[in-house]
Amino acid sequence: MTTITAGLNNITQEIPVRGMMANVMEQFNSAADQINLHPNIRKILSITNNEIIVNFPVKMDNGEVEIFTGYRVQHNNALGPYKGGLRYHPTVDIDAARALAMWMTWKTSLAGLPFGGGKGGIKIDPSKYSKDELERITRRFTFALADNIGPEHDIPAPDVNTNSQTMAWMADTYMSTRPPAERTANQHVVTGKPAGSGGLDGRDRSTGYGVYLSIKFWAEKNNKTLEGKTFIIQGFGNVGYWAGYFLEKDGAILVGVQDAYGSIQNKKGIQVEDLFKYIQVSDGSVVNFPNAQSVNKDDFFGLDCDICIPAALGNQITKENAPSIKAALIAEGANGPINVEGEKILLERGITIIPDILCNSGGVVGSYFEWLQNRNGELWQYDEVMGKLHKKIKESFDKVYEYSEREAMDMRTAAYCIAIKRIEKAYVQRGIFP
Ligand code: GLU
């Protein structure tokens, strides 16, 4: 049995995501109130455009057939094709897919991309399936989605427990179902592909790089340096690992990590690269990493540190653990890691939150670059990609930071206000058909 790791993270345990939709709606409504959003546009943005649920059969290695349920929710495409990841996780359901699709709409709008928002996945624990089975599941899911996705219509990408290999299978399946002359012109049906198959050099680290950059920009605004600052990460998958990698390069010290299997700490520091090498030989788990002590699951977020990076699943920081958080800054690598009640406590305590739709937007910005690269038949160089990512994240960060200072509001509300205003403008300009 193999586990697909290195998606948005590698958390595979069952964590309830109930209420994700309630969270995103509450965040949306409070920002909509702030900007006096027109009631008609509020109505439009409060619902999802399309919800696709597919049940499809796949032959398992033992010859038996299993039926899987896959989702793709397309929230809004006022600004361009639907864009967002596909996750493979037991918590995937229609509520989670809707909420995550909405978050993508705000994220792409805030980043100034010509994309809307979508999200989906399969309700599955991928660690229970072989690599061959996962390939057949992915290909059959792609086939079932059929023309509900497309390079100018809806463009999936990796997310929790999916990765560049998943995207390579999807692209190959989608392209194989097109007429021969149109096959390569459809390569940008998904982003996050391997660099050798139309993927973008640097896309693998773009989310984590964006998380690191937002922390760095925040530090700069507050006349601080990252040298010697301590941080903890929940989820040592693609996002957590790369965020840690870049922070460590700037002199910050990783002092605690939690994944689906357990939590570890070392006040003197955990070397990011050593931990990464360790999880390659430990079935993806950080548990029993030498040079660290194990920590009780419930004590993790209370560890002493300057910066906390939740980079796993939603609803991880709640009213239960928010009072114990020591960090002065929380950088949301995951989507929706803090629920509304938890956030209220954190804000009252004066803790700054760099919101998900800004903090982890490096991933979808990288996806946009990949999409452009494929669309234009180009191959972009790594340095060029990283430079452009830096510029984009800086622009978004500055916009949100300045808005929040000017309007005396938290960064999440500021980010939402900017994102929603851009969509509102498009609706006002275009009107409603017919
Ligand atoms: N799954 C990532 C996210 O939540 C990336 C989405 C994409 O690149 O389309 O932002």
Image (spheres, grey):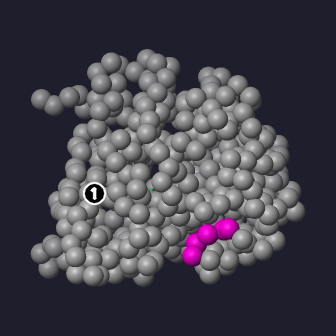
Q: Quadrant of residue 102?
A: top left
Q: Position of residue 249 (x, y in %)?
A: 76, 66
Q: Quadrant of the C terminus?
A: top left
**Ligand 1 lies in quarter:** bottom left
Q: Is residue 145 above or below residue 92?
A: below
Q: Quadrant of residue 79?
A: top left
Q: Position of residue 52 (x, y in %)?
A: 22, 50
Residue in the foreground of this view, choosing between 289 and 225: 289
Residue at 72% of width from left, 71% of height from top? 288
The residue under label 1 is which amino acid type? Gly
Q: Position of residue 387 (x, y in %)?
A: 59, 63
Q: Is residue 142 above or below residue 17?
A: below
Residue in the foreground of this view, choosing between 332 and 16: 16
Q: What residue is disc 1 on? A: 70
Q: Quadrant of the N terminus?
A: bottom left
Residue at 69% of width from left, 59% of height from top? 263
- Residue span colored magenta: 283-287
Q: Position of residue 371 (x, y in %)?
A: 37, 63
Q: Quadrant of residue 241?
A: bottom right
Any magenta on residue 237? no
Q: Is residue 144 above or below residue 284?
A: above
Q: Secondary structure at mark 1?
A: strand
* Other residues around mark 1 within 10 Å, as few (<14) / some (14–19) / many (≥20): many
Residue at 41% of width from left, 71% of height from top? 128
Q: Is residue 160 left or right of residue 277?
A: left
Q: Is residue 410 above or below residue 366?
A: above
Is residue 376 something one can see in this rendering?
Answer: no
Dominant SS in magenta: loop
Is residue 49 something one can see in this rendering?
Answer: yes
The residue at label 1 has a CB less than 8 Å from ligand 1: no
Any magenta on residue 285? yes
Residue at 32% of width from left, 77% of height from top? 133
